[in-house]
Amino acid sequence: MHAEHPRLLSVDGLSVRFRHHPANIVDDVSFTIGAGETLCIVGESGCGKSLTALALMGLLPKPAAQVAAGRAVFEGEDLVALDESRMSDIRGNRMAMIFQEPMTSLNPAFTVGDQIAEAVRRHRGVDRAAARGRAREMLEQARIPAAEKRLDEYPHQLSGGMRQRAMIAMALANDPALLIADEPTTALDVTIQAQVLRLIRQLQAERGTGLLMITHDLGVVAETADRVAVMYAGRIVEEGPVAAIFDDPQHPYTIGLMGSVPSLGRRSGRLETIPGLVPTPEAMPRGCRFSTRCPFAAAVCAETPALTEIAPGHRVACARAPIELRVAEDAA
Amino acid sequence: ADLRIGLQEDPDVLDPDQSRTFVGRIVYASLCDKLVDITPGLEIIPQLATGWSWSEDGKTLTMQLREGVTFHDGTPFDAEAVKANIDRSQNLPESRRKSEVKSITGVEVTGPHEVQFSLADPDATLLAQFADRAGMMVSPTAAAAAGADFGLNPVCSGPFKFVERIQQDRIVLEKFADYWNADAISFDRVVFLPIPDTTVRLANLRAGDLDMLERLAATDVASAKGDASLQVEEAVSLGYQGITVNVANGERANNPLGQDARVRQALSLAIDRNVINQVVFEGAFAPGNQPFPPTSPWYDTRFPVPERDVEKAKALLKEAGFDRLEIEVQVANNPVQMQLMQVVQAMAAEAGFDIKLTAKEFATLLKDQTAGDYQASQVGWSGRVDPDGNIHQFQTCNGGINDSKYCDPEVDRLLNAARVSNDTAERKASYDAARAILAEAMPIIYLYHQTWIWALSDKLDGFVPYPDGMIRLEGVSFK
Amino acid sequence: MTGAVLETRGLEKRFVTHRPLFGTPTEVHAVNGVDLAIHEGETFAIVGESGCGKSTLARMLIGLIRPSAGQVLYQGREMSGLPQKQMRALRRDLQFIFQDPFSSLNPRMTIGRLVEEPMRAHGIGTPGERRERVGRLLARVGLRPEHADRYPHEFSGGQRQRIGIARALASGPKVLIGDEPVSALDVSIQAQVVNMLEDLKEEFGLTLVVIAHDLAVIRHMSDRVAVMYLGEVVETGPVDAVFDAPAHPYTRALMGAIPVPAPGARDSVAAILEGDVPNPTAPPPGCRFHTRCPFAVARCTRERPALADMGGGRRAACHLRDELPAFDTRAPEPGRTPGAARRFELWRTARSAGQDDRHRKTTQAEETQP
Amino acid sequence: MAAPDAVPGAARAPLPGPVDEPVPPRRGSRSWTKLRSNPVALLGAALVLFFVLVAALAPVLPVADPTATDWLAVRKAPSAAHWFGTDEIGRDVLARMIWGAQASLLAGVVSVGIAVAIGVPLGMMAGYWGGWTDAAISRVTEALLAVPFLILAIALAAFLGPSLTNAMIAIGLSAMPIFIRLARGQTLSVMTEDYVEGARAIGLGHGAIIGRYVLPNIFPPILVQATLTIATAIIAEASLSFLGLGQQPPAPSWGSMLNVAKNFLEQAPWMALWPGIAIFLVVLGFNLLGDGLRDALDPREL
Amino acid sequence: MLGFIGRRLIIAIPTIVLISIFVFALQKLLPGDPVLAMAGEERDPEVLEFLREKYRLNDPIPQQYLHWMGGVMQGDLGVSLRTRQPVLELIAEKLPVTIQLAVMAMTIALMIGIPAGILSAVHKGGWIDWLANLFALSGLSVPNFWLGIMLILLVSVKLGWLPASGYQPLATDPLRSIQTMLMPAFVLGTGLAATLMRHTRSAMLGVLRADFIRTARAKGLRERTVILKHALRNALVPIVTISALLFGELLAGAVLTEQIFTIPGFGKMIVDAVFNRDYAVVQGVVLCTAVAFIAMNLAADAAYRWLNPRMREQG
Ligand SMILES: Nc1ncnc2c1ncn2[C@@H]1O[C@H](COP(=O)(O)OP(=O)(O)OP(=O)(O)O)[C@@H](O)[C@H]1O
Ligand SMILES: Nc1ncnc2c1ncn2[C@@H]1O[C@H](COP(=O)(O)OP(=O)(O)OP(=O)(O)O)[C@@H](O)[C@H]1O
Ligand SMILES: [Mg+2]
Ligand SMILES: [Mg+2]
């Protein structure tokens, strides 16, 4: 699809379903990531971004959640079908993930250094000292002060941001080909955030690491993404190059989202929001899942809209795109 | 060769003057020689004393002692040693033998190997006492040196000498080369191993970890007999088991069972002693109704073991004024005793007794019994060679172990008379006269007489069972 | 703005990180001599580098951990001296939103119970009323009332954060301290929550203390801001003044590092702070920031600058605060690109037109429920 | 601090605005539903129920008199007349099993109940308060542990007199330390969790924190230990009746049946077999039920 | 950590004194009279009175205690009333035996119980789980005496592989010593293994759902490492609690097992001593077991701090 990026991961029709739940929580999600490319997923909190990432890593909370359908081909292998032992060779090595909640994701019983070094030893087969060295190096790169000392501290002794950076160090320790980062910088202040993002970008430039980043910070998206996928209620509703998404949002949800960003200037009244609540899986509307909250919704929205390309590389799943046209039509 | 003997309990202190357990005596049989010994038929025969004679008035006993005997520490055995031993039994504050040698007023050394005992009154039981712990000779040198701690390292003159003891584990003796009768001894070492569980004790014997054991459970006799690699030996014991009733020992004697002999008779009649023997002991023991087993010459044949008679029991109970009567019997918390009492309970129920059983661990039981805090108590007595030992202390008014506090001057008179006479027939007459009274009053309801049962590896030869339950190793050997 | 509701005086916290068999233990000076006064009804923001002690400060503010030195005063009364009972009663007024939402929720309680808990603790309402209020609270943070019967692990990160917010609001607090309360929320929910907090402020004079990294949100929400660096407050003042003309070099570095939500708006991350973050167990002498400060002079390595008044309610701890070159304020970019803004206008019109319409649809969706 | 409000919550922020959507009624306990649909738990419950019924219905079940002896049928193997065989004095083992169920179940359940009811709160207090409370409770626990069971039992037998209740007290007391230690250790561990800090931040009282935050999270190991201790307690009852504290002969209990059977392992193995199987099944039942409960109470378990 | 242990050791001393007072008082309250128990069948009143005087049984109880304590201070624990052996000597004799048995039994218990618990948690609901549970629960409901006797009958009597009983000190003949202890240790060990297994299972089930397990998997760690390192370490608190208690109980002696395999350990000694009201011995043994329990509890508390670094801050 993108000539400049040799394809690294291609996800096709991925669905995740919880036992006893009536609807797919992640529904028919497809995207690709090339080497060195950054795909950002943004979307409503609770729309299934983390589950998508976990599904790729084979780390869904089993047996509660299961991949119901789809393929995810990574470096020629279908992650969904892979057996556990092969998967464990890939995880943390070719493909690594930074989890959203750093406190509970770190083992409270081991020092941070141990936990990072362990990943190194597992995949690189180096000795203890070398692994520790690498761990220190990674902590330093993640801008943790007094890295040597922090190696021997336990997660609870670190601040929220430090834990998050420890997670980042852990994920990057083996120079993965694909990095999945689930809100990697939420707990970081902007200066450190910038440094961490630079570190990741460096890695991408040097080794062609593909990055799947989940974030809510549209500033970060704007600065790092090559392409952006917008998710709503388990589906990708819009996908395209970063510039297109920011400057030409097509899906009403994307539009609403962009409209909610606070400006950095002096405050000017209340923030804009998208009214209403996401429907529960039980009450998920049959067609377009956003239709219950969409001001542009019409009868056609009862049909599930397909993700259709409306500009090169820019696809949207809305029966009513482009909006101006449809609104004008309605008015007419 | 080593001989390994399984004991039912761990003996207490190994000092003949202080010890008090039955198993302790089994160890002494190999460790300490006595002045005299008994035959399986309970006749007194020489051991360290080669001969003896009574004076006319029965107040002087002269003994000739064996020559060339030494104690394990090399101290020679002679008249002085005997004197020292009697002195120790009488005067060591911890001595438990005081009552047994109370009748001796003086010991005179009449020759290097002759000694003369003077008594205040004639004492028919003295020789029998000399056949037991009171007659065991310990090395006077060692005894003087160790004092009350002699038991930690006992020095006697028996066929084996003490090597080591580990509590609850083993007592090791080794052959004493200078033993006067060394030729009769064919083991280099004897190891006594206390193994309380009867099943396990037998299993050990079967596994070859033991060569013999004492007190095989009656219920195991059949299977042991069926095992070709084992032999079983038996001897009816000198002791008895029965129910001691509180007739005058404090408050709790005030109940129909304690106050009315008819009730006690009814209870006795309600019990089928043969069935007990069959059910609980698979017929291995001897039913009984007197302090001596029916096989004993002292047994009073006028009062044979009664047949069970429920009707008569009921009638007696009715006569005493009861249709049903609730009584409480305490029993030691060991399975066999409990089983016994449950059988009694079931039998008595048919005659109108509602027996409430209270299981107590032995120390509590004993304490309650002496303190009179009981109605009836199931206890027994291991038995003595002389009949006096089985009856006098229990049924005379001031008897040391008279826990029922039964007291009848006539019985006292008769039993005391039996003590001071050396004439067997005369003694028997006294005992029979007392029996006539006691069979009526029935402060103790006798039930049965245990049989000592030994199981031995078939490799052993020459073992002779004795009614006192001891294991004498003279003449015993591996085939 | 009336007097200070919350005040700190010389607040310090040291953590022992390593206690050797002999010798002195290693300590982290997490908070070092902080003096703050938070006024009733205002929104006070704390920003600063990760690990600079913000959470520790916040925990001390509500008395969850004891200060190593200094005092916290709530309405003029010292907190550490309060007896248990009053402390508990005070907690009704003083609520906290945890930075880590998941670990601060009891995994064995349903969301409904969790949110109801503060009301139960303070004996507010009957069970029925509480239940209803729980539903309302959940709706206010963008969760569904049905969620009340689910357990924390069944939620996404952002949803958990909202549970934390709902819970903190449940007792109707007077002061709310939020440790990164909206960091995991998507912008629209974030906006919803921020709006709600503002409503509450307006109606009930709620005082807010917010720790956050999203400077746009801070600028939008808060009245005053304190900037922390390595355990110390380096600058405080009204939010617009600080944002428009940061006095401390660290504040400047922060402002320069804000990512802009428009592709290509900032070609590279040029302005990021260089140099290693100092070791908090052995903070540099003099001005703590001097190791990374582009303007540092010799004096900065020796002398610790005090937090000095600059007028207009502003204070900054920098020797050079008056000598620094003027801060080139970036043109206040819009929150959205022109294309997005255009589309959003459409949305807005459609929305106001179709209000009733939308409502109808929601109920319809509700009815399809089995 | 603010003066206490006359009407709690009234002056404060009742959230503005109407309820957007109706609040659904509280759903029935999910744990209960989970428990009911868990086949393993149901099997456990069935086993326990079976024995409870047997114990309760012993007087009306058509079985022989458990104390009736038959001198001609001593230690007879199972047969048509005596399905489970007869014991050492010719009583019907089946009847004794059925009648013994009551004493044994009571001994098992009540004594564990005592141990849990006293031990767990003590342990939680020790772990929660730490400091002197912990020191005092821990020292008492150590003392309880160091006193030999035998001494305790004999002393209790002497002072409280022989009854099944007192036996249960004795067993409960001696099983208590393990619950104290377990509860304390788990509490210490739970106290480090952030949600406990969260509960404090809300302003919950100690009682509420202990009851709603600590207890449910330390519950699983307590449950495991309790279901295990039932077995030990059933067997221990026998040794107490032996010391004169518990069920007195001829009234049956499984433990004492086992105890007697010990001497007849070779001659009459069935005497040990039946009580052994019964204890096994009861313990299995309680454990399965416990597992089911554990799963039901753990929201993460499906 | 060392400071923590030091502090605890200091409070251990008053604890031991308290326990000894408690047990002393309790013993004195027991029905039964030591002298009567010692007197044997004959019960000569004169001797009884002498013994009462000699062993100060007529003194007021506090005075008796002080006298005993005075001895203890000088390293004299008194003598056994029953065998006149010094209690210290008796303890020195039994202690190695008891420790050996306890260590062997605990080793067996841990070697069976923990792996079985882990397997059963990992394969929850599967046949391995059922098998492990059935094994554990039968281990629990099969009385030790039954298993012990069956083992003797099978292994010693039928097969002749191991000696049926008897104890050999480790120092004199290590191989035989271990052989003789093997069956009793196994009997004890399987019972304890059941408990450990059930606790391990339950704790592991809880931990396996934690987020950090997911992180460990995300690192690509082998499932074995994930379970044995990351999960187990966090599941260990209840296991440590229970193990420490069980080990303490083993050190206090295992009466039935010692009796069946005739091993001269604390269990048999204390039972004999209690039944004979041999006060000095009981006191001595209780002193030892108190030390054992205090040490085990201390070890457990120290282990908690190691297992859960956050507990270190609780002081
Ligand atoms: N164990 C579970 N059981 C039931 N529902 C669950 C479970 N875990 C997650 N969910 C639901 O799945 C949905 C998607 O969750 P996910 O964590 O992927 O959201 P997200 O997009 O990452 O959101 P956020 O940005 O808030 O982290 C949520 O609505 C959540 O409530
Ligand atoms: N329990 C603890 N033990 C030791 N050190 C601690 C402990 N808690 C916090 N610290 C240290 O205190 C310092 C400040 O931590 P704090 O959590 O307050 O930072 P923060 O400003 O909230 O950072 P972030 O924005 O990353 O959450 C850090 O260096 C941290 O490592
Ligand atoms: Mg997420
Ligand atoms: Mg923080």
Image: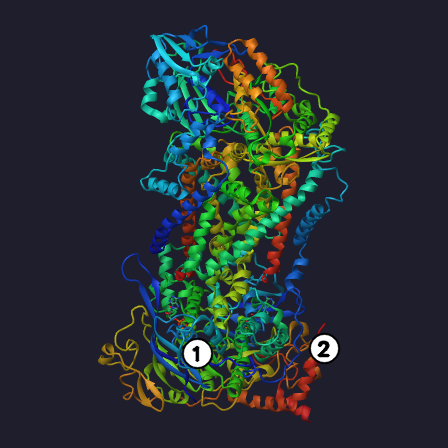
Residue farthest along the bottom direction in this orientation? A332
Whether tag 1 and tag 2 are in contact, CB under 8 A, the answer is no
Of the pair A153 and A248, the residue shown nearer to us:
A153
- Tell me the kind of residue under disc 1: His
Residue at disc 1, secondary structure? loop
Dots 1 and 2 on the same chain: yes
Compared with residue B89, is residue D106 higher up or lower down, i.e. above or below?
Answer: below
At a point 40% along the width and 81% down the height, the residue shown is C76
Give residue B259's quadrant in the image: top right
Q: CA distance from mark 1 to mark 2?
A: 41 Å
- Tell me the kind of residue under disc 2: Glu
Q: Disc 1: which chain?
A: C
Rendered-image quarter of ligand 1: bottom right
Image quadrant occupied by the C terminus of chain A: bottom right
Residue E179 showing in the rendered view? no
The residue at which mark 1 appears reads as C213
Q: Mark on residue C367? A: 2
- Residue E46 image point, x, y percent: 43, 27
- Residue E63 image point, x, y percent: 37, 42
Give residue B321's quadrant in the image: top right
Horizontal side, residue D219 vs residue C15: left or right: right
